[in-house]
Image (tube, rainbow, N blue to C red):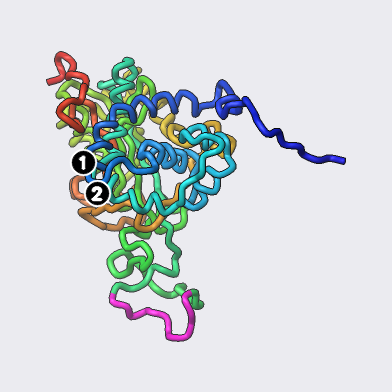
Amino acid sequence: MDEMQETLFTTVKLEDFVPADHPLRPIRLLVNQALKRLSGLFSVIYADSGRASIAPEKLVRALLLQVFYSVRSERMLMEQMQYNLLFRWFVGLAIEDRVWNHSVFSKNRDRLLEHEVVESFSTEVMAVADKQGLLSREHFSVGGTLIQAWASYKSFRRKDGSDDPPPGGGRNAEADWKSERRSNETHESSTDANSRLYKKSKQSPAILCYQGHILMENRSELVVGAVVSHADGFAERANALRLLDCVPGTHAKTVGADKAYDTHDFVSDCRARNVTPHVARNDARVGGSAIDERTSRHAGYRMSQVIRKAYRGTFRLGQDGWPDPADGVSRHQAGRPALQADDGREQPHAHGTNNGRGAHGSGAMSRRGAWPEERGIAAQANYLPERPGEG
């Protein structure tokens, strides 16, 4: 008869269950180094009430797991934490430790956002990588992706309330929009008002979403800047410039990007910043590409185009815990970031032209990460000095 017999005592450690070559092992080492440098900030945050019963370091590690494995809710994250030994090990919970309630995240989120803990954490991770000589300050790539809002099409209603469902139909009443023209100017989601109806190409369906943008350095393919914004046809280029502005120093730089960035405004704005735009040429666009052979004939241009494609698999782990290069659309829960955006213009698809307007204007809602010398969390922070010749 097949029966399981449990032992009263065991000498096996949680770490013994984690494969030696698992990608979370080096990530955990890097995370712990960064969190150690944030200890002073956490002490300031909780100075009024003392250290929380659940250490903020554990909350940060748990939230990282939620991102890595695309766990759709904090309730489900804590359920995973209950029986997933890998999650317990990464967060720092012993096998006999009780898992905290999911409401702990809600109680601590505002405090962590107010003190920009996520941004400070990203800065510390970059400082560790920079100290090890892993960061390039000359060659970069930019890219964007859609972050699907946790809102349905039925929540996308007229702002004036003229299409509210009749009483008695319930929350999920039948609706027919086939003959109705809908736009972000006249409609908004009643579930997540900051989201925008947007499609990335003519072939893809429109979804309620945000737009995420990253800046990746090309030496080690590390993300050194990230922004979340409203989704529109200008956000990718506008926020790419904002991320490039955060790179310290006025020395010459290069930036690789796809065809969506091949506009005359973006190219000229990059060159004004002493940044050579290695954008993929879009010769099919009306007026042709914004760059010519003077840029694309160089080996550095071809190298930038090879490396910039690597960002697609940079920050996602698959269901089995290993890197997943799939370029899926991630989800964002309604109301998560306490964010404000400057602009909400809509463009039918991301590859539209600028219609004469500059790339500036699409509002960045949240920036994650800063170069070590750009800002500090405390007077005692031991950030790396600016390198010679970067002033």
Does dot 2 land on a helix, a strand or a loop?
Answer: loop
For residue 162: magenta?
A: yes
Does dot 1 land on a helix, a strand or a loop?
Answer: helix
Local crowd size for mark 1, using a 10 Å CA cut-off: few (<14), some (14–19), many (≥20): some
Relative to 387, residue 13 above or below: below
| Residue 265, numbered label | 1
**Where residue 294 sits in the image (x, y, percent)?**
26, 23
Q: Which contiguous range is marked in magenta?
A: 160-171
**Dominant secondary-structure state across the stretch colored magenta:** loop
Residue at far right of view: 1
**Where residue 154 sits in the image (x, y, percent)?**
44, 69
Q: Nearer the viewer, residue 386 or 201?
A: 386
Q: Residue at x 55, y 44 (%)?
A: 82
- Quadrant containing the N terminus is top right
**Where residue 100 sits in the image (x, y, percent)?**
46, 47
**Amino acid type, residue under disc 1 in the picture:** Asp
Relative to 139, residue 315 above or below: below
Res 197 quadrant in image: bottom left
Q: Can the viewer see residue 288?
A: no
| Residue bearing the label numbered 2 | 354
